[in-house]
Image (tube, grey):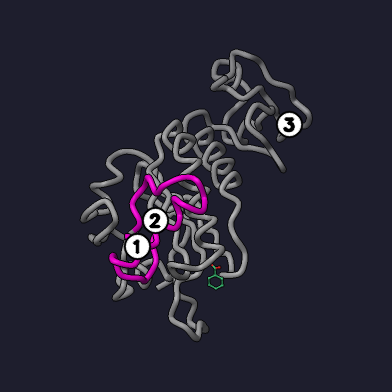
Amino acid sequence: MALHLGDTAPDFTAESTEGPIAFHHYLGDGWGVLFSHPADFTPVCTTELGRVAALKPEFDTRKVKVLGLSVDPLEDHEAWSADIAETQGTALNFPLIADPDRTVADLYDMVPPAAENNLTVRSVFVIGPDKKVKLIITYPASTGRNFDEILRVIDSLQLTANYSVATPVDWKRGEDVIIVPAVSDADADAKFPKGYTTVTPYLRVTPQPDL
Ligand code: BEZ
C-alpha cells in the first residue's frame, strides 16, 4: 500500500553495513532520512552515496540519522563501500540497509509496479521524531538526487515543527520565513520577538527565528 505524508513510517528490522537495525529504535526521538538507490556497483548511486557521506556532518548538526537501502545483499554493500571510498573521497559513514527479499522496499513502496527489473528507485523519506512521514520524493534511476535540497527541506520542516513558520518559494537558510496563518497577530507578537512584516493579512514575514 502506498505511503502518504502524515502516515506512521513502517517499522522494520534489517541487516545493514553497521549491523542489524530496528528502524524505530534506531531513530530514537530524532529525525531520520531513509533513501533507496537502484543497485550497488552503479555509477550514479556511487556518486550519491559519496555525497551523502560527505554531508554527514550537516545531517548530524540537524540531529538527523541517514540510512541508505537497496535490494542488494550485505556482501555487495560491503564490497561496494571500498569503491565509494576510493572514487568519491569519502568512506560510507552511515548504514546501508541490505534488503534482498524486498521487505523494506515493499513496505515503503520503493519499487514502482511498472518496474521491469524489480529494483528500488531513488526514493527519499524524511521521518519526524513522532515517526510520521514528513516528506516523500521519488526520482527515476537515471537522475542523481540533490542532497542539498534534502537538507533545505529538513531545515524547513524543523522550523515548522519548532517555531510555527513556513518557508516561501526558493527559501534558503538565513532568509525570512512566513508565520503560519494559524498563529494570530496577538500570538505572533509574543512568539516572534524580532518582529514581523504584514504584507497582506495572510502573508506575514519574519527573520528566521533560530538564528
Ligand atoms: C546508476 O546508479 O548509475 C543507475 C542505476 C540504475 C539505473 C540507471 C543508473
SS type, badge 1: helix
Of circles 3 and 2, which is in front?
A: 2
Queried on whether the Cβ of the residue with tag 3 lies below 8 angstroms from ligand 1, the answer reads: no
Q: Nearer the viewer, residue 166 or 158?
A: 158
The residue at which mark 1 appears reads as 79
Please state which of residues 209 and 198 is positioned toward the viewer in this rendering.
Answer: 209
Tag 2's secondary structure?
A: helix
Magenta segment: does it hold 82? yes
Q: Where is residue 6 shown, x and y percent of the image?
A: 44, 54
Taking the spot 54% from the left edge, 56% from the top edge, the residue there is: 47
In which quadrant of the rendered image does the C terminus lie?
Answer: top right
Does residue 85 sit above or below 183 in this rendering?
below
Amino acid on which disc 2 is placed: Ala
Q: Which of the two marks, 3 or 1, is nearer to us in this view? A: 1
Q: Quadrant of ligand 1?
A: bottom right
Q: Which residue is mark 3?
A: 201
What residue type is disc 3 on? Pro
Furthest toward the right, the residue is 199
Residue farthest top in this picture = 193
Residue 82: which disc?
2
Q: Is residue 101 above or below residue 68?
A: below
C-alpha gap between disc 3 and disc 1? 58 Å
Q: Quadrant of the N terminus?
A: bottom left
Q: Residue 25 at what x, y percent from top left?
A: 23, 47
* Residue found 43% across the figure and 67% down from its top: 40
